[in-house]
Structure formats: C-alpha cells, structure tokens
Amino acid sequence: MNNRDVAAAFDEIADLLEFQNANPFRVRAYRNAARRINDLPESLTTVAADPNRDLTEIEGIGKDLAQKIAEFLDTGSIAMLEQLRDEIPGGVLAMVRIPGLGPKKAAALHKELGISSLDELRAACEANRVAELKGFGKKTQDKILAGIDLAARAQERMYWAHADEIVQELLAHMRKLKGIRQMEVAGSYRRGRETIGDIDLLVDAEDANAAMDQLGRFEELATVIGRGDTKMSVRLGRGLQIDLRVVPSKSFGAALQYFTGSKDHNVILRAMAKDRGLLVNEYGVFRVAAGDSPATKKQSTKSTENSAKTKAENSDVAATGESPVATAGEYIAGRTEEEVYAAVGLPWFPPEIREARQEFAWAEAGKLPTLIEVTDLVGDLHMHTTASDGQATLRAMAVAAIERGLKYIAITDHSPRVSMANGLNPQRLRKQWAEIDRLNGEFDDFTILKGIECDILEKGGMDLPDDVLAEADWVVASVHYGQQQSREQITERILGALENPYVSIIAHPTGRLISRREPYAVDLDQVFAAAAKHHKFMEMNANPARLDLDDVAAAAAKQLGIPIVISSDAHSTGGLDVLRYGILQARRAGLTAKDVANTRSWTAIKKMLPK
Ligand code: DGT
Ligand code: CA
Ligand code: CA
Ligand code: ZN
C-alpha cells in the first residue's frame, strides 16, 4: 500500500460524493487530501507506524481523514468507500471521467436512458439517443463520443511515474530472493514512455520456478494470468500487468534488447543483421548456417522492411514457446546489449531513443547525441508558492531547491485572471519581489528570480501591464482559459504573447493532460517559428500528467534552435522532484544538456533572453 493508492481511494471518494451532490467542502477536503498525499515526500505507512507521530501532523489531514487512512493501511479498504461503490454503479462513475460529462449529466443519462457503462453510453450516442435528451444536443453527444475513447485509453495505460513506484516495489521484492544474477525492467518503462501498458520484467536466475514463485508473492490481490516453465504473467490488484521472463545469462543481453523494443526499432535491427548474414532474436545473435545462399540475401535487401517484419512475427511465435528454438546457427553474442548491437556493427542505444525515429541515422553518421541527465539541471524556472495556489512558502521552496542542489529558481505564481488560484495583482506581486530581494541577501551561491506565470487572456494580450512584466526577471506566459477556442484564435493568442518583449517562455504549450484532456488546437509550427524569431524559450513541463512539450514536439523545437526549459511547475516542495520525468521525456526527444537552457547558469540564460 503506498501513498498513491491512498490518494486514489480519496479521489474516488471525492468523485462518488460529488456524484451524490454532497457538500462541496466535504468533496474538496478529500480532493485536497489526495493531492497532499500524492505530493508527500514520505510514506504514510512510515508515519502511521511511528508511535511518536500522528497522521494528523500532515497538512490537510484531520482526525476523520487520519482514521480513514489508518483503516485503509490496516485492512486494504475503506468501509465508507465500499458503501459508496455499492450505491453508485461503477459505469456511471466512469462516465464522470469523460471530459465534458459532469456528475449531473452522467446522472441524467443513468436516470433517463438507464446507461451504466461506457459501452452502453457509446451505443446510445451512436443511436443518436443522447442528442435528443434535454440539455444535451448533437454537439455534446459528439464530444461525449470522442471522450469515451480517451476515457477508455486512460483506464488501460498508467503514467510512467506511477508505474515507476510499482516497479521500485517490485524490484525490492524480487531482490529478496537469492539466486537472481541480473534483473531489469524492459519494455516501454525502460524507454521512458509517458504511459506504460504493462511491465516487462526480465530475470537472469538459476531457478526459474523460484523466481516465478517470488513474483506470485508480490501482491495479495494479484491474479496469475498464465505460467509456463520460464514465463509468467500476473495482473496486480492495482490494475497493472507484469510479464516475467526468466532467461539464462547467455541470453540476458539479447532478451533485454528484444523486450525493451520498441517493436519498430527491433524490426530495423533485425533487417540490418540479416544483411550481414546474422539472426538476432531474444536468445542471442547467431550466424546463419551456411546454405542460406547469398542469392537469397541479395534479393532480401530490397524488401528488407517486409522480410524483417515477417521474421519478427515468426520469432514472436517462437517467443511464446518455452525453449530456445530459433538457434539456426552459431551463437556469437547475447550476454550484454552492447555485445548484441556490436555484432551488427552498431553502438549501444540509450533505451529512450529506440523508437525507430532517427537513432539509426545518427548511429550511421557516428553522431549519437549524449542525452541530458537529471544532474545536468542547475535551476528550475517555474514554481508556485502559498502566495497563489502552492502549498509551501517562498522560503520553503528556496530551501527545498537548495537541498536538491539547484543554483537558482524562478518564483512564478499566477496572475490575477486565475482568481481561483488567488492570482497576484501588481501590488501583491511587487510585495513578493521585495521579499525575494530580502531572501536573496541570506543565500550564498543561490538566486531566487522574480518571476510570474502570466495568463494569456481569452481576448488576447497579457494579464498584467507591460510596466510590471518589465520589472520581472522571468515571465512565463500560459493559457488557462478559453482552451476550447478555434485553432486560429488560440494560436493568435500565443503568437501575441511571443511578440510581447517581456515574455520569456510559453508554459505547457499545448495544455494537454495525458489520457485526460486533449491538447488545445494550437498550431505549434507557427508558435515555434515565432519563438525562434523572437528568441523565446519553450517549456517542457515535467509534471507526469503534462509532459508538455512532448518528445516529438521538443525534438521539433530543437531543430529550430529554440532553447527548451525543463520545469517542475511545483506546487509544493515535493513537487520539485518531478524534474526527472521531464528529463526522461527530453531524452526521448534526443536532447543534450546543450539543448536545455536550465543546464546553464542564470547569467548565461540572461544573455539568451530577448533584449
Ligand atoms: P506497452 O507495454 O504497451 O507500454 O509497450 P511495450 O513497448 O512495453 O510493449 P510490450 O509490453 O507489448 O512488449 C515489450 C517489448 O517486447 C516490445 O517493446 C518489443 C517486444 N515485442 C513484444 N511484442 C512484439 C511483437 O509482436 N513483435 C516484435 N518484434 N517485438 C515485440
Ligand atoms: Ca510493456
Ligand atoms: Ca508486455
Ligand atoms: Zn504553473
């Protein structure tokens, strides 16, 4: 049981209460608690187990919530949540998660049309029955239909950050077993994809049965989907599936390479191997037995892609078998990934770039980028404090940043338009800046920059006057309202911000929330062109739900020479730790330390700002 599980339970309670039209303050209490718990730097289990401490020490956790946490930690469930679940059909709640479908509309659909699952909802939309309902209409129906797919996908894939928590627990659990020589999580997790479909665990161990038994003991609520001699699949109570494969040392590198993927990367690798008379599969690299005439080899060059695909599919069939079958030739490599790639005349590729994008071209040119690492970051240029909607004071944020080895931070609270977040007017902002001046006097070798996250207004233009923005060290411009505007409108607004001489950067440029909210219709090509022209920066927001820019867009920005800033957008001290998720995404974009501005000193960044 970890913090995220407790937070998820509280979020679900909030959803269910909201659905029942419960007191909004009560709903908010559960939501806030969920968010606080998610951001908490220490485990609730640890706090609960300490006789000298009390869960109510945690901000936002009163007596009642503390009791519920204790109940959850003790029994694995909360009676009140179970009761709520009984009262409200599961499918109805799934409907609430669809963008644009609040509790009221979901309740109406349930009451009027008897809908209680996403499938039934889809059918009703397709039969045009939703459009005819009072308060809905054709437009809403279309939106719901689009939203169903999004909601369905969200249930299937997990944020990398969440999967990582489970992976760390899993590895710790597996390490308790003696006789594991090597162990690695492969697949999309290792490639650092923003969402993870399932976990591919690879183990090099003497005793495959012992390893599978140990996996079987990982979680009480797990169900075993299948088990063979060397492979096993389980589905965790938390929804995630784990595929375990046990392989011999001789094949560990080959299996790691194979199961890390991506599939498309592997297809190209195998085609290249084939041209050299080699066969690469999950057991190793093999020299193809003589008799495979050079004539067939020649022929195959033309249709490399296709024949490689066929081979890939064939070897997948082999992979589902239990013993090394595809050993049609002499084994020449397989212990390490380096060895596998070297056998095909290739360098080792960092997993994040194995997506069949540019990596093979880079390798051929001898120009694999040295990807950025989290330790390269020396500053963080987007965060909030208690002055707007953050949970920690200015001083606490500074101290937390220093503890994490950063040399500078920009405090970028919200502007007045974001009234819900208590956005700062010029007067409050200047007061904060005076406090920053005072605080900077206290620190050696650390600088707090005077910043602002200034909203780009719906009608265009910035939410604060130019004379105020001119006084800031760093101006983050972002869109929070009017996200439904047309492509022209929303692009025009952002272009306007880029033309403002005091704007430094566009935050979360597409506004997407992974699996939850589509990006706004912004034309990024135009935005990038303007950013390059006006010497502006682009943010890669490191929040695991945002990761915005994404990998593909960030690579495009790099092409144009636009400096990228990886930012935490922290709303608490713990929020500063998300930078590493941004780093993963940046690596997937092929970014080096040079491409990312906050690997440099503040003095260096200042010189890059528009004059
Ligand atoms: P996911 O789990 O959907 O987030 O994505 P992956 O990339 O982890 O995919 P997964 O778990 O289906 O398989 C892990 C790796 O194993 C994949 O990246 C490459 C390899 N693999 C799996 N299925 C196939 C296949 O049908 N053909 C080939 N060539 N490779 C496969
Ligand atoms: Ca996977
Ligand atoms: Ca898998
Ligand atoms: Zn922000």
Image (cartoon, rainbow, N blue to C red):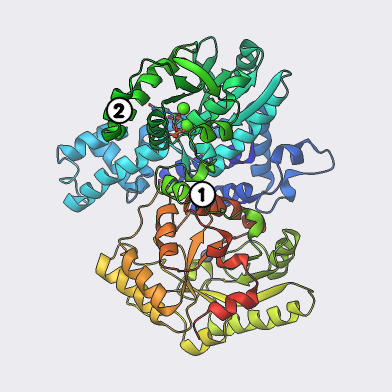
Residue 268 left/right relative to 188: left
Q: SS at mark 2?
A: helix
Quadrant assignment for the N terminus: top right
- Label 1 CB-ligand 4 distance < 8 A: no
In the depicted view, which residue is nearer to us: 414 or 207? 207
For label 2, count other residues whose C-alpha is less than 10 Å away and answer few (under 14), some (14-19) or many (20+).
some
Q: Is residue 471 visible?
A: yes
Q: Amino acid at mark 1?
A: Val
Q: Position of residue 214 (x, y in %)?
A: 65, 17
Q: Quadrant of ligand 1?
A: top left
**Point 40% across, 54% down: residue:** 552
Looking at the rendered image, the disc whose residue lies closer to the viewer, 1 or 2, is 2
Task: Measure the C-alpha gap from mark 1 to mark 2.
Answer: 57 Å
**Point 38% across, 68% down: residue:** 528
**Point 54% across, 75% down: residue:** 452
Q: SS at mark 1?
A: helix
The mark that comes first in sequence, 1 or 2, is 1
Q: Position of residue 453 (x, y in %)?
A: 51, 72
The residue identified by callout 2 is: 307
Q: Position of residue 18 (x, y in %)?
A: 44, 46
For label 1, count other residues whose C-alpha is less than 10 Å away and answer few (under 14), some (14-19) or many (20+).
many
Residue 579 left/right relative to 321: right
Residue 401 left/right relative to 533: right
Q: From what the image shows, is residue 467 above or below residue 551? A: below
User: Residue 27 bears which disc, if any?
Assistant: 1
